[in-house]
Image (cartoon, rainbow, N blue to C red):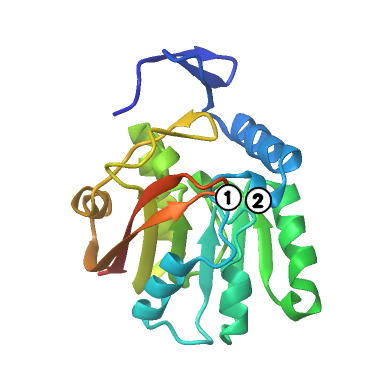
Amino acid sequence: MPRQAHQVYGRTMTDHGIQRPDDPAARTEFWEGVHHSKDIDGVSWWQSVPGLSLGLVDKAGVGLDEPVIDVGAGWSTLVDHLLERGYRDLTAVDLSTTALQTVRDRLGPAGADVTLTVADVLDLRMGREYALWHDRAVYHFLTEPDERADYLTSLNRSLRPGGRLVVATFGPDGPTTCSGLPIVRYTHTELAAEFPGYELVDTAGEEHLTPWGTSQQFTAILMRRR
């Protein structure tokens, strides 16, 4: 559960001295700083091949012409791999302009039709609906009920009825912080219960090895919007 905290100019100072960004401007500043100050393989979540995500996307059974959105994409290579697999309507969203510019440069001409959008997932207004929503390691940063409610509002605004939802967070034996921020860990059952109006299709997990060799337990679910 979230630690007791007090407000410090748009951030929350936890009992452990961590300044947690809790408004849009502070979140943007924080994540832009992370991506501007570190190398791609200098962040714990880096994967050259996002196997857990790709496996659940395969199980979702989304057609190659159907729209897919990856929220909190950062430097993730998910869109690269989906593009290689023939998906033609891909969108990646992140708060960091630096992260998305790196993705644009990496994709090159082959990714000219991939939509890269700087936006806050807690107030996402893309003006269209998607067949699949993918989130690896955003949801576990939402330690406050109002943040999770805003996330669900953005999700319901963006995912069409019958659409698929893939969410991955740290599991019950995973880290308690990431990038210096507190997170919430979930079991499969706990994570699925966060999404009323959705039915569980499948579960998965992995022991993710960080670039420096430590292990992080991930919990992941595939759900369908009723």
Tell me the element at label 2. Answer: helix
Q: Is residue 144 visible?
A: yes
* Residue 85 percent coordinates (x, y): 56, 85
* Residue 213 percent coordinates (x, y): 51, 47
| Of residues 171 and 208, the one drawn nearer to the viewer in this rendering | 208
- In primary-sequence order, the first of circles 2 and 1 is 2
Marks 2,1: beta carbons within 8 A: yes
Residue, disc 1: 211
* Residue 144 percent coordinates (x, y): 37, 31
Tell me the element at label 1. Answer: loop
Look at the image and tell me in which quarter the C terminus lies: bottom left
Residue, disc 2: 41
Figure quadrant of residue 143: top left
Give me the residue at 69% from left, 51% from top.
40
Q: Is residue 161 visible?
A: no
Give me the residue at 28% from left, 29% from top.
1
Give me the residue at 37% from left, 34% from top.
146
* Residue 77 percent coordinates (x, y): 61, 65
Q: How many marks?
A: 2
